[in-house]
């Protein structure tokens, strides 16, 4: 058993409600949703935090945005608006140390964020 929950989900050793999959990226519903639509967009490759992203990973990171756009369209929140959030390290509230943006939508979002 890998100690990273998201690596376990990607390997299909743990269940998740997948909404998108390709050879580099998966997206699945957050187990504890903070909005009507709350999807995690996750590279198959394990990076603990944003600080582990290197210049050669830039294309993959860009693809996370493209996938998030597709998922936002799939859930029909693209025109209303949505938020794409990366939490990095403790004060930002990162709890799973496998890089992932949260795609949040389906309600009005507050600013500044909590
Ligand atoms: P972070 O706090 O690292 O930015 O985001 C981690 C997210 O993963 C949290 O929103 C949390 O609810 C979600 N999460 C934690 N464990 C699981 C799990 O086993 N399955 C799914 N689908 N989401 C999880
Ligand atoms: Zn991982």
Image (tube, grey):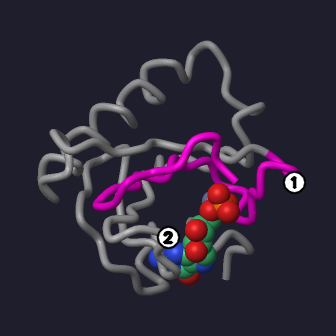
- Distance Cα–Cα, label 2 vs label 1: 19 Å
Is ligand 1 less than 8 Å from the beta carbon at label 2?
yes
Task: Name the residue at 40% across, 55% down.
Answer: 104
Q: Is residue 4 visible?
A: yes
Q: Is 51 on the left or on the right of 113, as rendered? A: right
Q: Front-most of 76 and 9?
A: 76
Helix, strand or loop at disc 2?
A: loop
Q: Front-most of 42 and 39?
A: 39
Residue 41 tag number:
none
Mark 1 Cα shell of 10 Å, populated few (<14), some (14-19), many (≥20): few
Mark 2 Cα shell of 10 Å, populated few (<14), some (14-19), many (≥20): few
Q: Is residue 8 visible?
A: no
Which mark sits nearer the N-terminus, 2 or 1?
A: 2
For mark 2, what is the residue?
34
Helix, strand or loop at disc 1?
A: helix
Q: Is 98 on the left or on the right of 71, as rendered? A: right
x, y percentage for residue 31? 48, 81
The residues colored magenta run 89-114
Above or below, 21 against 67 in this view is below
Task: Name the residue at 53% across, 49% down.
Answer: 110
For mark 1, what is the residue?
90
x, y percentage for residue 81? 28, 42
Check the picture and name the quadrant holding the N terminus. bottom right
């Amino acid at each position: 058993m890998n100690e990273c929950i998201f690596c376990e989900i990607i390997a299909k050793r743990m269940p998740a409600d997948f909404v998108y999959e390709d050879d580099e990226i998966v997206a699945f519903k957050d187990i504890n949703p903070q909005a009507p639509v709350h999807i995690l967009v996750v590279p198959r490759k394990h990076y603990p935090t944003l600080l582990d992203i290197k210049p050669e990973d830039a294309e993959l990171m860009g693809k996370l945005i493209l996938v998030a756009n597709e998922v936002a369209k799939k859930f029909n929140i693209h025109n209303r608006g949505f938020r794409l959030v990366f939490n990095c390290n403790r004060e930002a509230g990162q709890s799973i140390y496998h890089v992932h943006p949260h795609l949040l939508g389906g309600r009005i979002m507050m600013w500044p964020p909590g």
